[in-house]
Image: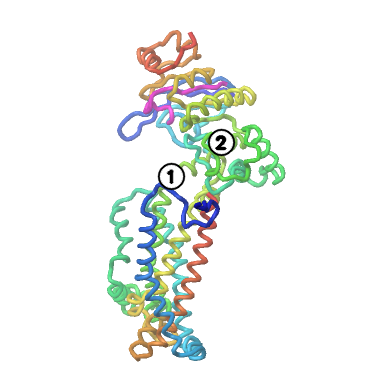
C-alpha cells in the first residue's frame, strides 16, 4: 500500500511552469562555480596565519586606515550619488531639453570607460596644475592625491548605478499621483515629500547600495588620483595588491576576508530595509 | 454656486482639443460629458480641476474666476480613471491625505481626522479596510477609496474621469446605482466623463454630448434621446450596443 505523503515537506509546490529542477540545478552550479568556490578559497587562505596572525594582519594600523578609507569613502560617495543621481534621473525622465539623448548616454560612460583611463583623466584634471585642480588649489582645496580625490573617483564610477536604477521607477510613477496630491490641496513640497519620495525610496536605496558596493571594491580609477600615501590615501584593494607583490598571500587574503564580510553585512542590511519598504505596496 | 463655462478653447500641438465650449451647470446637478475618445471631454474635466489651462475662455463658479484659482485651492475633488491612489499609504492614510496637508491653522486635530476617515470608510462601504494597502483590495474597492479621498476635503465640486472605466460590467452597475444615491445624499455639483451612453443616461441629470472639441447637444437624457439635435448625436446614440433608450 502506497502511503500518500499529504503534509510532508516538498521541495516545491506542484505547478505548471516546467523546468524547475533544471533551472535550480543550473543556478546552484553556476553560482558555485562563479561566486561561491572562489570566495570559499578566499575564506580558507588566511587561516594559515592562525587566529592571532589573522588578527594582527587585519588590525595593523596601515590596514585599518586603508579599510576605513575604502568603506568611509565608498559611503560618502554613495550618499553624494544618492542626492545628485536622484536629481539627474529626475531631470532625464521628467523634462525635455536640448541634447537630452546625449546627456542620457553620458551617464553610462563610467560603466564603459576603462577605470584606469577614468583615473588618469580625473587626476590630470584635479592635479594642482590641472584645469579644475589649479582654481581649487587657489582656494586652498587639494583634491588629487588626498582622500578627497578618492571620493571624487568613487562618485564618478558610482553615478550610473543610482541613475539607471531610478529612471524606470520615475517614468513608471507618472504624473497622476502628483496631480491627485495637488487636487487634494498639497503644496509642491508636500507632494514631493509625502508622495514622490516614498515611492522612489526603495529604488533609491537599491541604487545607492549598488554604488556603494561598486565603490568599496573599486581599484583602477582610484589608484591614479589617490596618491596612495600609506595611512592617508591608500585604499584597501591597493594594499591587497601590495601584499600580493610581496608574496604575503595570507595577509592579502585576510584583508580580502574582512572586506568580504563587511560588504556582505552592509548589503544584506540594505536589502532587508529595501524589502521592508517594498512589501508595503 | 452654479458653474458657468464660457467659450473654452484649448489647442494641443496639432489639433484643437476644445473648440469654443460653453455650458451652464446648475448648483447640485450631476452632469455627464459623453463622447467618443478624443472628443475633448477629459481635457475639459482637467481644466475644471486645475490640471490643465485653456488658451481662451472663462469659467465662473460660486462667483469666482475659477481659472485664476490654483488647483490646490479649488477644493475640486478629482477621481482619476486609474484612481491614482498613493500606493505606499494605507487606505486610511490615502483618505486622510487631503486633511493632513492642510495649512496648520486649518488642519483638524488627529482625533478628528481619524473620526472623519472612519465616517468616510463607512460612507463608501469599506468599513474595516482602513489598514489595507491599495494593492490588497479589489478594483471596485480602490475606486471607492479614490472617491472617499476626494470627498474628505469637503469638495465644492466633484470631477470624475471615466469613474467605472476599469471595472467589469457587474461591479460597474452596482457602483453606478450607489454613486447616484450618494450624489442625491450629498448634493455636490458633479461632472463625470464617460464614453458609455447607457451610463450617462442612467446617472446624469444633464448630458453634454461632445465631438471633436465641441458640444453637439446639451440637455436632459430624455431630450437628447427623443430629439437628437445633430446627425452626429443621432448616429452616436444608434451605435450604442444594448443601450435601451428610455423612450
Q: Left or right of A19: which side holds B243?
A: right
Asked whether the viewer can see residue B102, the reply is: no
Instruction: Please give the label number shown on residue A174.
Output: 1
SS class of the residue under badge 1?
loop
Q: Residues within 10 Å of mark 2 (few under 14, many from 20)?
A: some
SS class of the residue under badge 2?
helix
Q: Which residue is mark 2?
A: B141
Q: Position of residue A74 (x, y in %)?
A: 44, 72
Q: Nearer the viewer, mark 1 or mark 2?
A: 2
Numbered range of the magenta stretch: B29-42
- Which chain's residue wears label 2? B
Q: Position of residue B96 (x, y in %)?
A: 62, 42
* A29 drawn magenta: no
- Which chain's residue wears label 1? A
Compute the Cα span from label 1 to label 2. Answer: 22 Å
Q: Left or right of A191: which side holds A100?
A: left
Amino acid at each position: 500500500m502506497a502511503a500518500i505523503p499529504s503534509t510532508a515537506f516538498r521541495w516545491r509546490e506542484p505547478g505548471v511552469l516546467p523546468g524547475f529542477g533544471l533551472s535550480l540545478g543550473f543556478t546552484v552550479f553556476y553560482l558555485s562555480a562563479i561566486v561561491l568556490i572562489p570566495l570559499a578559497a578566499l575564506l580558507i587562505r588566511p587561516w594559515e596565519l592562525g587566529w592571532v596572525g589573522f588578527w594582527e594582519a587585519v588590525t595593523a594600523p596601515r590596514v585599518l586606515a586603508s579599510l576605513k578609507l575604502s568603506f568611509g569613502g565608498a559611503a560618502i560617495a554613495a550618499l553624494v550619488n544618492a542626492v545628485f543621481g536622484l536629481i539627474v534621473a529626475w531631470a532625464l525622465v521628467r523634462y525635455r531639453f536640448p541634447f537630452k539623448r546625449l546627456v542620457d548616454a553620458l551617464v553610462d560612460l563610467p560603466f564603459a570607460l576603462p577605470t584606469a583611463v577614468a583615473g588618469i583623466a580625473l587626476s590630470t584634471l584635479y592635479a594642482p596644475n590641472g584645469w579644475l585642480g589649479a582654481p581649487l588649489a587657489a582656494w586652498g582645496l587639494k583634491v588629487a592625491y588626498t582622500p578627497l580625490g578618492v571620493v571624487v573617483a568613487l562618485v564618478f564610477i558610482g553615478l550610473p548605478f543610482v541613475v539607471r536604477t531610478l529612471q524606470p521607477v520615475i517614468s513608471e510613477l507618472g504624473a497622476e499621483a502628483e496631480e491627485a496630491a495637488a487636487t487634494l490641496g498639497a503644496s509642491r513640497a508636500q507632494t514631493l515629500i509625502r508622495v514622490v519620495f516614498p515611492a522612489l525610496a526603495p529604488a533609491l536605496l537599491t541604487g545607492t547600495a549598488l554604488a556603494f558596493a561598486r565603490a568599496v571594491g573599486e581599484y583602477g580609477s582610484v589608484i591614479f588620483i589617490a596618491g596612495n600615501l600609506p595611512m592617508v590615501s591608500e585604499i584597501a584593494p591597493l594594499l591587497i595588491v601590495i601584499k600580493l607583490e610581496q608574496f604575503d598571500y595570507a595577509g592579502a587574503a585576510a584583508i580580502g576576508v574582512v572586506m568580504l564580510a563587511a560588504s556582505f553585512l552592509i548589503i544584506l542590511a540594505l536589502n532587508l530595509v529595501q524589502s521592508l519598504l517594498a512589501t508595503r505596496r | 454656486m452654479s458653474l458657468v463655462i464660457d467659450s473654452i478653447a484649448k489647442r494641443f500641438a496639432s489639433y484643437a482639443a476644445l473648440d469654443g465650449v460653453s455650458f451652464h451647470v446648475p448648483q447640485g446637478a450631476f452632469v455627464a460629458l459623453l463622447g467618443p475618445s478624443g472628443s475633448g471631454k477629459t481635457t475639459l474635466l482637467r481644466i475644471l480641476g486645475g490640471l490643465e489651462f485653456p488658451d481662451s475662455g472663462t469659467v465662473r463658479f460660486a462667483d469666482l474666476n475659477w481659472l485664476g484659482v490654483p488647483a490646490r485651492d479649488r477644493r475640486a475633488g478629482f477621481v482619476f480613471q486609474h484612481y491614482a491612489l498613493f500606493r505606499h499609504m494605507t487606505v486610511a492614510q490615502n483618505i486622510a491625505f487631503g486633511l493632513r496637508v492642510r495649512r496648520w491653522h486649518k488642519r483638524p486635530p488627529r482625533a478628528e481626522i481619524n473620526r472623519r476617515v472612519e465616517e468616510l470608510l463607512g460612507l463608501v462601504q469599506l468599513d474595516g479596510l482602513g489598514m489595507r494597502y491599495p494593492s490588497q483590495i479589489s478594483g471596485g474597492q480602490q475606486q471607492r477609496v479614490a472617491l472617499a479621498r476626494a470627498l474628505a476635503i469637503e469638495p465644492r465640486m466633484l470631477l470624475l474621469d471615466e469613474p467605472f472605466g476599469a471595472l467589469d460590467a457587474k461591479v460597474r452597475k452596482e457602483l453606478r446605482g450607489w454613486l447616484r444615491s450618494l450624489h442625491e445624499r450629498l448634493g455636490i455639483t458633479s461632472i463625470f466623463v464617460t464614453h458609455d451612453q447607457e451610463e450617462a443616461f442612467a446617472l446624469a441629470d444633464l448630458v453634454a454630448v461632445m465631438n471633436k472639441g465641441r458640444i453637439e447637444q446639451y440637455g436632459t437624457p430624455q431630450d437628447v434621446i427623443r430629439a437628437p439635435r445633430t446627425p452626429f448625436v443621432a448616429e452616436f446614440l444608434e451605435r450604442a450596443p444594448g443601450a435601451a433608450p428610455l423612450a
